[in-house]
Amino acid sequence: MASLLPYYGSYAMADGDIVVIARMGWFFDLGDASYRTIYASASANRFSIGERFFEPLPKFADLTFDGDRLSFAGRTGHHIPYPQTDVSIPAKGATLAATITAPLGAGPHPGIVVVHGAEHGQRYFYDIWVGVYASLGFAVLTYDKRGIGASTGTYPGEYPSVDALDVYADDAEATREFLARRADVDPHRVGFHGGSQGGWTVPLAMHRHPGAAFAVLVSAPATTVGQTDAWAAFSDGGASQPTESNDQMLAEVRATHSGYDSAPALRALDVPALWLLGVNDRTVPTAICIEILDAMHKPNFTLQLLPTGHGLLVNPTGLLADDNRSPGLAPELVPALRTLLAAHS
């Protein structure tokens, strides 16, 4: 949403909450986890949000921006001036365009690189995560995938083939190394965030290039690519209600073994790792992921189950239509991150 460009970022509210405005048109309140779509109005500085994620009516509040001030629903806040720096990162056969957002205060800060899922990923896709991690005191690096946005090189494609994941893993490590070399960042406290397909990329990057301090893996598969595809196919990724029973679907997924397998990388992972998994995920088979991870008996793994679908929106069915009616992201999300990352801040 181009008209949000002057206003995106984080706002410290007078009541102590932090609200994040994302360029893609999202509103997130870290206090109560409400997550809304932002709708434009005839006024350049006024927008609105509904009571549910993707439902404009009934209207919940008008958002009014005045300089660095945000007002809505009787609340006011001011823009947090997190320093942002655009950088170019050399990678094999490409130059990755990235932005580093630093928290307030003197460093050295812990750092985190946000790694893309399966999409034509650009930096602005992750404004919400930037706001969350900066509020926790982290320097956050987001980047355009190679061949996308301002990054050069050849885009490997969305499908998570072994070759494509190797490229994405090497790119992720190039960005982590770059962030770790900054004077205001503690090189021993830099880790990764990987969502969805990024849940394959991040452990692979850490396996190929040891050095990351931690990993946050969101709606991330521990299953093979074939198993994950089989699960998603039952509902077209949440677009429709499956016709098979849950037991039938899980049995078929367990019997499927094809494509990239993250198990070797996961077994080698020896730093703190937090999985945030939706119990109603229609893209990733959460129940089987838990079986796989539990069987590894790794004390550095923490699994946090959330009452959500794949997008971490509170959702009793995991179907995309129910994402639209969701009141917000899982309330457990930010506290779980705060607990894991406290040791790295």
Image (tube, rainbow, N blue to C red):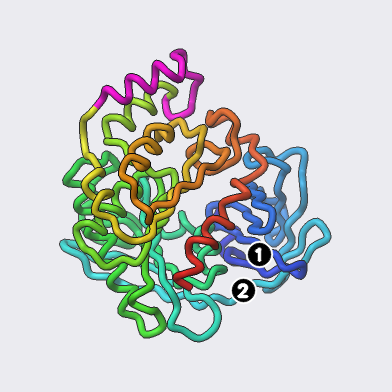
Q: Does residue 238 belong to the magenta stretch?
A: yes
Q: Left of 93 or right of it: where is 16? A: right
Q: Is residue 51 above or below residue 130?
A: above
Q: Which residue is mark 2?
A: 80
Alpha carbons under labels 2 and 1: distance apart: 9 Å
Q: Residues within 10 Å of mark 2 (few under 14, many from 20)?
A: many
Q: Which mark is residue 262?
A: none
SS for callout 1:
strand
Residue drawn 52% across and 73% down? 137
**Residue 227 sits in quarter:** top left
Tell me the amino acid under the disc marked 1.
Answer: Ile
Select label 2 or label 1 by which is in front.
1
Disc 1: which residue: 18
Viewer-side residue, 152 vs 273: 273
> Where is residue 92 shown, x and y percent of the image?
16, 63
> On screen, 280 above or below 83?
above
Q: Which residues are magenta?
A: 236-256
Which callout, 2 or 1, points at the residue further toward the start of the chain? 1
Residue 99 coordinates in the image, percent (x, y): 41, 69
Q: Residue at x 50, y 59 (%)?
A: 129
Q: Is residue 218 magenta?
A: no
Q: Residue furthest right?
A: 74
